[in-house]
Amino acid sequence: MAETAASIGPYPAFSGRLIVIETTRRWQTTLNWKAESPEQGWLRLTHAASGTVVEFRWLHETMQVRDNKNTTWKQINQHQLSQQGIVLPPQQLASVLLGKIPNHFKQKKPFHWESLASGSLIKLEWNSDRHRLMISDIKHGRRATLIIQP
């Protein structure tokens, strides 16, 4: 994967919050993240209101998920993730969080990048003072805010 210079991270491991806003629903979770390379990583999402805990891991293109109700790891693909509001594949998000913006994202102004690679306009906006990454999927009306507590 070719890369361009970035000014995010590196954040190979952190805790934080994920806030997702869609046209019909909003949800918030705590997040634990570990990915020392884009090729391999793990994350845990905890939704306090429902008591749901979801773990997700990937190794290259293989992605698996499990939760506290179904403890067996199951394969999942990017289409299934996008149906849950996840617009960036975890490998690309890991690359971004490690300070290496994928080359299909073009910097529009400082701390703002855009990509049409997925067929939808995806925007990244980084606020370094607040350790906050906003990911917007303009076509589908989705916005995710990742708040990092390094």
Image: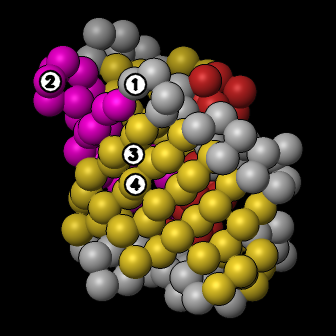
Left or right side of 116 for 40: left
Give the quadrant of residue 55: top left
- Precedes in sequence: disc 4 or disc 3: 3
> Where does the image place residue 106, in percent across and percent down from the top left?
77, 76
Residue 49, numbered circle: 2
Q: CA distance from mark 4 to mark 3?
A: 16 Å
- Precedes in sequence: disc 1 or disc 3: 1
Q: Are marks 1 and 2 in contact (CB under 8 Å)?
A: no
Kind of residue at disc 1: Arg
What quarter of the picture does the C terminus occupy? bottom left
Q: CA distance from mark 1 to mark 2?
A: 14 Å
Pair 1/2: label in front: 1
Whether residue 74 appears in this view of the structure is: yes
Give the residue displayed 29% in from the left and 10% down from the top: 69
Kind of residue at disc 4: Thr
- Precedes in sequence: disc 1 or disc 2: 1
Identify the residue under disc 1.
25
- Precedes in sequence: disc 1 or disc 4: 1
Kind of residue at disc 3: Leu
The residue stretch that appears in magenta: 26-53
Residue 43, numbered circle: 3
Q: CA distance from mark 1 to mark 4?
A: 14 Å
Kind of residue at disc 2: Ala
